Amino acid sequence: MPIFAHDKGEVFIGRIRRDETQPNTLNMWIVADNLRKGAATNTIQIAEDLIENNLV
């Protein structure tokens, strides 16, 4: 829920599902306090985590 992200630096991810319409893709629900964490930084950190865990 977005209310849980208020005033926090963490990013909350849930509802991770395979995207059946595209190969090698995922759909996920991502919530963060955008005033504390910018979208570009968050995107890079998610990509780094996916690579680190051999998910892409």
Image (cartoon, rainbow, N blue to C red):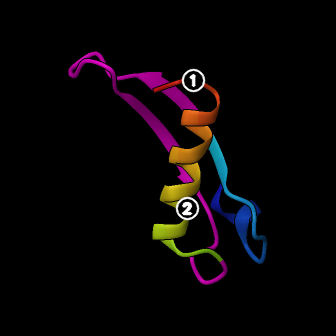
Q: Are marks 2 and 1 in contact (CB under 8 Å)?
A: no
Eye-nearest disc, 2 or 1: 1
Residue at 60 percent across and 84 percent down: it is: 35
Label 2: which residue?
A: 42
The amino acid on which the numbered mark 1 sits, given as a three-letter code, is Asn
Please tell me whether residue 17 is drawn above or below residue 45 in the rendered image.
above
Residue at 63 percent across and 34 percent down: it is: 52
Q: Position of residue 28 (x, y in %)?
A: 48, 37
The amino acid on which the numbered mark 2 sits, given as a three-letter code, is Asn
Label 1: which residue?
A: 54
Instruction: Report crowding for label 1: few under 14, some 14 to 19, many 20 or more residues within 10 A (C-alpha).
Output: few
In this rendering, would 18 be left or right of 41?
left
| Quadrant in the picture for residue 27 | top left
Residue 15 drawn in magenta: yes
Give the magenta part as a residue range. Answer: 14-36
In this rendering, would 25 be left or right of 34?
left
Does dot 2 land on a helix, a strand or a loop?
A: helix
In this rendering, would 2 be left or right of 5?
left
Q: Position of residue 42 (x, y in %)?
A: 55, 62
Q: CA distance from mark 2 to mark 1?
A: 18 Å
Residue at 54 percent across and 75 percent down: it is: 38
